[in-house]
Amino acid sequence: MSEITLPGLVDVHTHLRVPGGEHKEDFATGTAAALAGGFTTLLAMPNTTPPLTTPQVMEEAFQQAQADTRCELGLFAGASPEQIGQLPALAPYAVGLKIYLNDTFGPLRVEDLPTLTSCFQSWPQEKIIAMHAEKQSVAIGIGLAATFNRPVHFCHISRRQEIELIDFAKRRGLPVTCEVSPHHLYLTQADAVRLGPLGDMRPLLGTQDDVDALWDHINDTIDCIATDHAPHTLEEKRAASPPPGVPGLETSLPLMLTAVQQGRLALSRLIELMSTNPRRIFNLPEQPDTRVDVDMLPYRINSNTLLTKCGWTPFDGMEVIGQVRRVQLRGEIVYEKGLSIAPPGSGQMLS
């Protein structure tokens, strides 16, 4: 099997740094990196500077994305106690609402019950709520899903206790889904020590037991593989107080195809995790005449060849299999042999 063809992949968790962090990434460079990784649809998070919590900031970010995106792109609105009354006005621009219950990079964190209740009461029923929830916060999210009888999607689950609790909730029929990021499947606390600030992210890397638990649930409980692409410059990462986060758009697919080669999951399951399920959960449109051609040959990940603006990866030098050769989006070749052909603004916005 020297070549395979996949449908356009969907990444439901990216940080494209607009507005306020364009020196790390922007809509044009981030979507170029996405195409290089086989992703034809991205959803971008709201913890920007300023965050996507007011109609003005949301509209400006939407218009900027419309001018710069090379693939299909949707934006999350952010929940903020100070701006909670503006949630209905954000909804027309957003694919979903993101609530941060735990530490994150940026000011968005919800710690009070009135704000959480308002989110579940005022956010449109047809648009999903996604949560950054760790450890006991996962139980809060599950309780809210049950109380308000509406879907909740848990971002970047990373611990055994979290995935086992979500598995229990699913078996009880509760409307919850979850994603896992490749760095939490492949890296542990030992790698965090080895990598230093390049291995610092949120959630923090777990133990080998946590990693084993995620792999144990890869074929049932886990719904999506999401990159949590969170680029920072090397200068920022090497500073006295480095920000958390790692890039992932161009390494996610080869890491997961390597798992397929190793027999850890079937190719059909990978397609469910990276295309079918994300479209279903987030109610995203299908993309006709869209395909991703992949050379199934071994190679080493090289930071110098990445299209992401930050230009580094914690997986530099790792041998993987599966390099994207060509991407066709809605009948047009948008990426081929290391080059992003689609011009900025040729993509479509989702809302």
Image (spheres, rainbow, N blue to C red):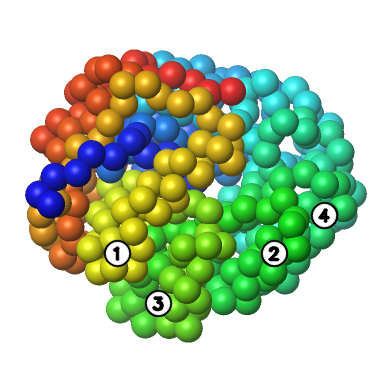
> From this viewpoint, is residue 234 visible?
no
Q: Amino acid at mark 2?
A: Arg
Q: Amino acid at mark 1?
A: Ala
Question: Mark 1 or 2 closer to N-term?
Answer: 2
Camera-side mark, 1 or 3: 1
Residue receiving disc 4:
146
Mark 1 and mark 3: span between their CA atoms?
17 Å
Residue receiving disc 3:
188
Residue receiving disc 1:
259
Residue 116 in the image: state x and y as whole percent: 82, 49
> From this viewpoint, is residue 74 visible?
yes
- Circle 4 crowding by C-alpha within 10 Å: few under 14, some 14–19, many from 20: some
Q: Is residue 102 above or below residue 228?
A: below
Badge 1 vs badge 2, beta-carbon distance below 8 Å: no
Question: Mark 3 or 4 closer to N-term?
Answer: 4
Q: Is residue 69 above or below residue 212?
A: above
Residue receiving disc 2:
171
Q: Is residue 159 above or below residue 8?
A: below
Question: Mark 1 or 3 closer to N-term?
Answer: 3
Question: Mark 1 or 4 closer to N-term?
Answer: 4
Residue 12 in the image: state x and y as whole percent: 50, 42
Q: Amino acid at mark 4?
A: Ala
Q: Which mark is residue 313?
A: none
Mark 3 and mark 4: span between their CA atoms?
32 Å
